[in-house]
Image (spheres, grey):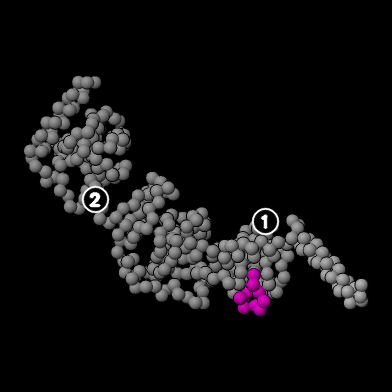
């Protein structure tokens, strides 16, 4: 073997030896007890990671400086050369600018830390006004912190607006415009911290299309929350959710008819059944259980509940009777503005009275 071949073989053996050392070092670096580039891998799959819980450990520190908020920490990272990640410690208000995030730990410091990449967007926090966006719910709360907590509990909530004068917390999926007329309102994005006040440098929130501004002027849908007695006037209903608030919420269009609820008198219509009950609420429940029942009349003096398919006229002679439509809520008393219930033919009233009297007689005879 020539000297050149020996030299070439020696070089090859050295390269193999070095490769083995590198492989062992790599194995050590990615062992279970060592730093892992999980954040970078996750970012490749899910996109940019912004203000996620946890701290970047075993990562190269570029700078450490105090800042008041995580948004200010992000801004500092963006202004610091070589910074591509940041970790903000809420208790000490320290901002760590990092060149990379090798291991994002979400267990050690818990909610006290947030981390993110330098390309994260800035947020609107504590701005004055009420967010006009796709409604995700309304609640009555005592403080803006409670409003934030309500928003955080709803996956689709991205903005929350709180009015301390009414205690109303509005949750929305977006915020294309602010209602500046609400001078006491405070609006923030979901990612904002408690008490944080900030507006992105490239503020575009007020630059909304005129088309949207026009749409918000006219109500075409409503949602009513029974527990808080809050009424939300909406320009459109893009998604009607029937699972979150259940029976506590009712919604409808602005063209819905008004209902007769708790009016005095007995309904004279096509009879669908009669029952003996103790209260008007039981009478309403009996009507709701019958598909063809649209009206119910209750006479507390006789305990008779009359269910009818319609109500062309009221028998005003029954002074103790209470009549309501099926859609009425418990205890509701209302008469439509265009009241036409009294304008019923006298013939119908007479025939209805005879029919109801006959049914009542048969009912008690069967008993």
Residue found at x 25% / y 32%: 305
User: Which quadrant, please, contains the N terminus?
Assistant: bottom right
- In the rendered view, would you say 352 is above or below 115? above
- In the rendered view, would you say 289 is above or below 174? above
> Which span is picked out in magenta?
76-85
Name, please, the residue furthest toward the left.
Answer: 347
- In the rendered view, would you say 75 is above or below 138? below
User: Which quadrant, please, contains the C terminus?
Assistant: top left
Q: Give the class, few, some or many, for how many residues have Cα within 10 Å of label 2's Cα (few <14, many ≥20).
A: some
Residue found at x 70% / y 61%: 36
User: Of discs 2 and 1, which sits in the foreground?
Assistant: 1
Q: 193 or 207: which is nearer to us? A: 207
- In the rendered view, would you say 362 is above or below 324? above
Considering the numbered disc 1 on the image, is that residue within a helix, a strand or a loop? loop
Quarter occupied by residue 191: bottom right
The residue that mark 1 highlights is 107
Q: 272 or 193: which is nearer to us? A: 272
Q: Is residue 353 left or right of residue 205?
A: left
Specify the label residue 258 is tagged with: 2
Q: At which x and y percent is residue 246?
A: 41, 46
Q: At which x and y percent is residue 359?
A: 17, 28
Q: At which x and y percent is residue 149?
A: 52, 56
Q: For residue 94: magenta?
A: no
Q: At which x and y percent is residue 338?
A: 17, 52
Q: Is residue 101 left or right of residue 307?
A: right
Q: Is residue 211 visible?
A: yes
Q: Is residue 19 left or right of residue 211?
A: right
Considering the numbered disc 2 on the image, is that residue within a helix, a strand or a loop? loop
Q: Distance from label 2 to label 1 (Cα)?
A: 55 Å
Q: For residue 83: magenta?
A: yes
């Amino acid at each position: 073997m020539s000297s050149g071949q020996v030299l070439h073989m020696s070089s090859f053996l050295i390269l193999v030896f070095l490769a083995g050392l590198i492989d062992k070092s790599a194995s050590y670096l990615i062992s279970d007890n060592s730093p892992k580039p999980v954040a970078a891998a996750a970012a490749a799959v899910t996109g940019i990671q912004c203000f996620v819980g946890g701290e970047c450990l075993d990562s190269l520190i570029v700078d450490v400086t105090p800042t008041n908020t995580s948004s200010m920490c992000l801004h500092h990272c963006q202004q610091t050369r070589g910074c591509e990640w940041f970790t903000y410690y809420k208790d000490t208000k320290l901002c760590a600018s990092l060149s990379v995030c090798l291991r994002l730990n979400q267990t050690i410091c818990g909610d006290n830390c947030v981390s993110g990449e330098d390309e994260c967007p800035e947020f609107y926090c504590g701005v004055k006004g009420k967010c006009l966006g796709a409604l995700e719910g309304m609640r009555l709360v005592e403080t803006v912190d409670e409003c934030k907590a309500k928003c955080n509990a709803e996956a689709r909530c991205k903005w929350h607006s709180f009015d301390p004068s009414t205690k109303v917390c509005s949750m929305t999926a977006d915020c294309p415009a602010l209602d500046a007329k609400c001078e006491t309102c405070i609006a923030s994005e979901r990612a904002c911290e408690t008490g944080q006040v900030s507006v992105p440098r490239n503020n575009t929130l007020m630059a909304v299309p005129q088309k949207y501004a026009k749409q918000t002027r006219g109500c075409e849908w409503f949602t009513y929350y029974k527990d808080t007695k809050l009424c939300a006037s909406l320009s459109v209903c893009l998604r009607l959710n029937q699972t979150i608030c259940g029976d506590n919420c009712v919604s409808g269009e602005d063209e819905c008819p008004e209902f007769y609820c708790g009016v005095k008198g007995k309904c004279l219509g096509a009879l669908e059944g009669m029952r003996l009950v103790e209260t008007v609420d039981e009478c309403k429940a009996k009507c709701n259980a019958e598909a063809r029942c649209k009206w119910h009349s209750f006479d507390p003096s006789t305990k008779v509940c009359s269910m009818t398919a319609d109500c062309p006229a009221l028998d005003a002679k029954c002074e103790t009777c209470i009549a309501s439509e099926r859609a009425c809520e418990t205890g509701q008393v209302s008469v439509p503005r265009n009241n036409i219930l009294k304008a019923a033919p006298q013939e119908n009233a007479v025939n209805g009275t005879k029919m109801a009297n006959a049914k009542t007689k048969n009912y008690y005879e069967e008993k």
